[in-house]
Amino acid sequence: MMGDSAERNSRRAFEEIESHYLDLERAVPLKKEKLRVFTGSVQQGTWHAPGGSSFIAQLLKDAGAEYILQDRVGRENIEIPLEEMMVLTQSADAWGLVLHYPGLFGKEELMASDERHAWLMPASGRVFVANTSDCDYFGWWVSRPDAMLENLIALFHPDLIQVQSDQSCFAWIAL
């Protein structure tokens, strides 16, 4: 279905992505105190979050953060009752969301989208988003884990890496 040349080019592209990812992962300082992060969304009173063995959990770990649900088995999304999530988030430093919101998105828009968000807000007030109206999160970004890792490292460790705003998907929202 493809010639030798296409196979070589494909293999080279994947190897470059892997090499860049591993270089980025090694650049993250090992710290005892890590940013504790949770991610997911509320739908009909139930929190849906990636499992502890998921792609997102691994990205957060490799970016030097601690995923609050890292001990939950599985790669797929898991359901957590809102009441349990309210308890879990008390120990979180930051919240990450993937959403679709044309225009500027900040605390007001987050709170207006669901009143329960106020119950989940970490004490720090730190929230980062991947706004799919601004970046192709489910397309290009997911196919480039190295770029996602680089963007998360720049977010969590701005002293290590600076990413151009037009080359980022994750960003802290103004609170």
Image (cartoon, grey):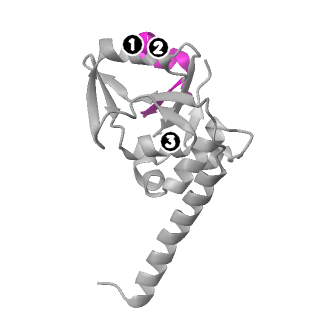
Under mark 1, the amino acid is Val
Pick whichever of labels 3 and 1 is earlier in the sequence.
3
Query: Disc 1 designates what residue?
Result: 87
The number of discs equals: 3
Residue situated furthest right in the rendering: 159
Measured as percent of width and height from the top left, residue 2 is found at 34, 84
Residue occupied by mark 3 = 61
* Helix, strand or loop under label 2: helix
Q: Where is residue 39 in the image (x, y as percent from the top left)?
A: 43, 30
| As drawn, 141 above or below 93 | below
For mark 2, does the 10 Å Cα neighbourhood hold few (<14), some (14 to 19), or many (20 or more) residues?
A: few
* Residue 106 seen in the current view: yes
x, y percentage for residue 7? 41, 82
Q: Which residue is drawn at 31% across and 11% down?
A: 83
Q: Which amino acid does label 3 sit on?
A: Lys
Position of residue 87 measured from the top left corner of the image (x, y, whole percent): 39, 13
Q: Name the residue under label 2.
A: 90
> How much space separates mark 1 and mark 2, taking CA atoms?
6 Å
- Residue toward you, 156 or 151: 156
Q: Residue at x 46, y 48 (%)?
A: 136
- SS under mark 1: helix
Q: What stretch is highlighted in magenta?
A: 94-121
